[in-house]
Amino acid sequence: MAERLQKVLAGAGVASRREAENWISGGRVTVNGKLAVLGQRVEPEDQIAIDGRRLRLERAAPDDLLLIYHRSPGEPLKSDTAAEGEVGTTTYERLPKLRGRRWLPLAPLAPTDGGLEVLTTDGTLRAHASKLAHEFVSAYVVRVSGEASPELLEELKGRAAVADPPFEILSVSAAGGEGRNRWLDFEVRRAHGRDLRNLLLAAGFEVSRVLRTRFGPVTMDRGVMRGRSRELTQDECDAVYKAVGLPNPFERAQKLRADSRIAAPTRPVNRGPRGRGTSR
């Protein structure tokens, strides 16, 4: 089935869709040896090249990766969000190095927040996850100053329902702390860290930390220290793909190879003159 070129490039994990559009407009992409144009549709057997180097889509899918990363609060995701003069402190600089692909966050944290980041090299997975992220259940721990009574915690659920934009608190509970610092556990849907921060500020709390500990089927691994990452297990990968309604990467890779395979012409068997075989 023909697909738009920029979607194919994004699905291969080599660029975001916007970057792919810029590459096409800049004349960096060719299809079957001819300059590509925006909106062009390509078939699985078409030969796509970037800066003259052929993109082998049929080999990209089996190598797709998923990992979790423990991000520190305030750590910039990439260099254009880092403060001037900072070196070696971005998330991308601390991830495993890739050749010909890039890491894509499924639901990036705000710069002020920390905790669980889930990243992939599969652009198709990232696109589906972005559309469905608001339906995933996420978990956060938030550090506030001061005690929160059980009555106030229950009241937060109602306040979340009428917030702008509204979101759902599935559960909230006190999780200990030291001195005036207290931790609150939240399970939410359709909420980001900033939504919880704003909700608690409006309730009169000082918020000093917002950490994500779960995103959909993926939970933060306590063994992953800040600034470190870990590849997801096969079971974890399968759970992520299932959550967004995609087949697991191995099944997709087999389908991609089958769709892009060009049948080779059949060579007739040389049996020599009629009535005589070639065997001796």
Image (cartoon, rainbow, N blue to C red):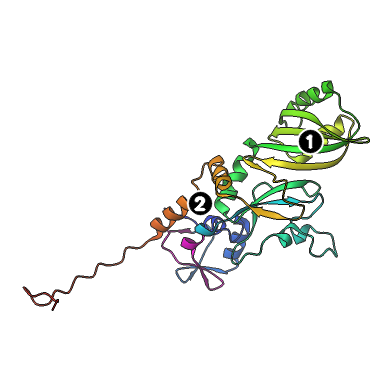
Percent x, y for residue 280? 13, 79
Q: Which mark is residue 196?
A: 1
Instruction: Specify the amino acid type for callout 2.
Output: Pro
Q: Nearer the viewer, residue 10 or 121?
A: 121
Percent x, y for residue 141? 78, 38
In the rendered image, the vertical position of residue 275 relative to residue 80, given as above or below = below
- Range covered by the magenta-colored residues: 41-60
**197 left or right of 213?**
right
Q: Nearer the viewer, residue 135 or 118?
A: 118
Extreme residue in the top direction:
151
Q: Secondary structure at mark 2?
A: helix
Q: How many numbered dots are placed on residues in this image?
A: 2
Q: Which mark is residue 32?
A: none
Residue position marked by numbered label 2 in the rendering: 249
Q: Earlier in the sequence, mark 2 or mark 1?
A: 1
Can the viewer see residue 165 in this picture? no
**Badge 2 local density, few (<14 within 10 Å), some, or many (20+)?**
many
In the rendered image, the vertical position of residue 175 relative to residue 257, given as above or below = above
Write the residue at 86% across / 29% down. 203
Residue 123 within the segment the image draws in magenta: no
Percent x, y for residue 105? 66, 51
Q: Secondary structure at mark 1?
A: helix
Can the viewer see residue 236 in this picture? yes
Residue 42 within the segment the image draws in magenta: yes
Instruction: Specify the amino acid type for callout 1.
Output: Leu
Rendering quarter of residue 227: bottom right
Write the residue at 56% across / 40% down. 243
